[in-house]
Amino acid sequence: MKNYVSPSELKSFNLIAILVCFALFSQAQQQSIRASVYFETNERLKFDAAELDNACKKLPDNSTATVIGYADYVGDDAYNQALSEDRARNVSEYLKKKCNGTIKITTVIGKGEQPQGKATDGDANARRVDVVFEFAAKAMPQAPKQQPEVKTTEPLMESPSEEAFEIDTVVRENIVLKGLSFIGGRHFPTRESMPELYKLVETMKKYPTLRIEIQGHICCDYSQPDGMDNDTGEPFLSKNRAEFVYEFLKGSGISESRMTYIGLGSTQPKVFPERTEEDQQTNRRVEIKIVDL
């Protein structure tokens, strides 16, 4: 599969992304931003606080913060639980001093061990603390960020209007979006996934009576109903992935009456247990259930 998009396709995608962001912000009473800090193995005190410092400069008064600590899978469960709690507590103390009364810390918790691999030296991404800052939506309005300009010497992608999924109208098997996957912790698909979304649009146009349920999935965390969405700071990652596809189709002219969406969390993994990053990426997905045809 080609890994580039034409300028006209990227412009269309940017417009849809902006509309989705506007809808989310207009419906929310609170706005949020997220910052993460990372630790060396067994470290609980020293961390690079640049993201926290930057966030404190932007936050309005009366903001709140949720501080969540994690550890990797090296060591036993009890040790990693205590380690994650210490990390969260130390980041919380840092924020109290750095933000100088701007924020109120509402929650400080440790989630313990995050089993994300088998390397003997652990998982650097799991040795972290996430901080979700929340504040009144009107206190700090922000314009949507523009996507960076894409420069390529490769030929432009052929028009996606020529492609569509073939559906067996008798068996009515679900549509498998084999090329659609998402950025870890986010509800935005990878750049290479865009052709699969265009094929889905063309499929909906080719079969005008097709009605679907868009099902979002996540990887890695089997202890919670859904994952944390780093873009919104809310624990609805699989639902937001499904909603992104829903909004993309709607923005491409597909009627809302033909679509519903749902987040299934990690209840239906395609690969289990997840032993590699490729396994995790396989489970970060959206699938399409045919409701009627």
Image (cartoon, grey):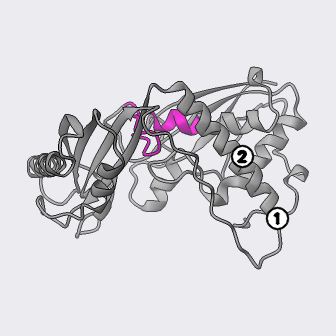
Query: Mark 2 and mark 1 in contact (Cβ < 8 Å)?
Result: no
Task: Tell which of 7 and 287 is nearer to you.
Answer: 7
Q: Position of residue 197 (x, y in %)?
A: 72, 47
The quadrant of the picture occupied by the C terminus is top right
The quadrant of the picture occupied by the N terminus is bottom right
Classify mark 2: residues with Cα within 10 Å, few (<14), some (14-19) or many (20+): some
Q: Position of residue 70 (x, y in %)?
A: 23, 50
Task: Tell which of 155 and 275 is nearer to you.
Answer: 155
Q: CA distance from mark 1 to mark 2?
A: 19 Å
Q: Position of residue 220 (x, y in %)?
A: 38, 47
Task: Tell which of 267 and 111 is nearer to you.
Answer: 111
Can I make out residue 179 in this image? yes
In this rendering, the answer to whether 156 lies above or below 84 is below
Describe residue 272's horizontal placement relative to residue 128 as left or right: right
Q: Which residue lies at the image location 59% right of the left edge and 51% below the top edge?
A: 189
Which mark sits nearer the N-terminus, 1 or 2? 2
Q: Which residue lies at the image location 38% right of the left edge and 30% below the top edge?
A: 225
Helix, strand or loop status at disc 1: loop
Range drawn in magenta: 225-242
Describe residue 127's horizontal placement relative to residue 31 as left or right: left
Main secondary structure of the magenta stretch: loop
Q: Position of residue 149 (x, y in %)?
A: 67, 66
In this rendering, the answer to whether 129 lies above or below 133 is below
Classify mark 1: residues with Cα within 10 Å, few (<14), some (14-19) or many (20+): some
Mark identifier at residue 157: 1
Q: Which residue lies at the image location 17% right of the left edge and 66% below the top edge?
A: 41
Helix, strand or loop status at disc 2: helix
Judging by the rendered image, the residue that carries numbered circle 2 is 15
Q: Specify the quadrant of the image occupied by residue 8.
A: bottom right
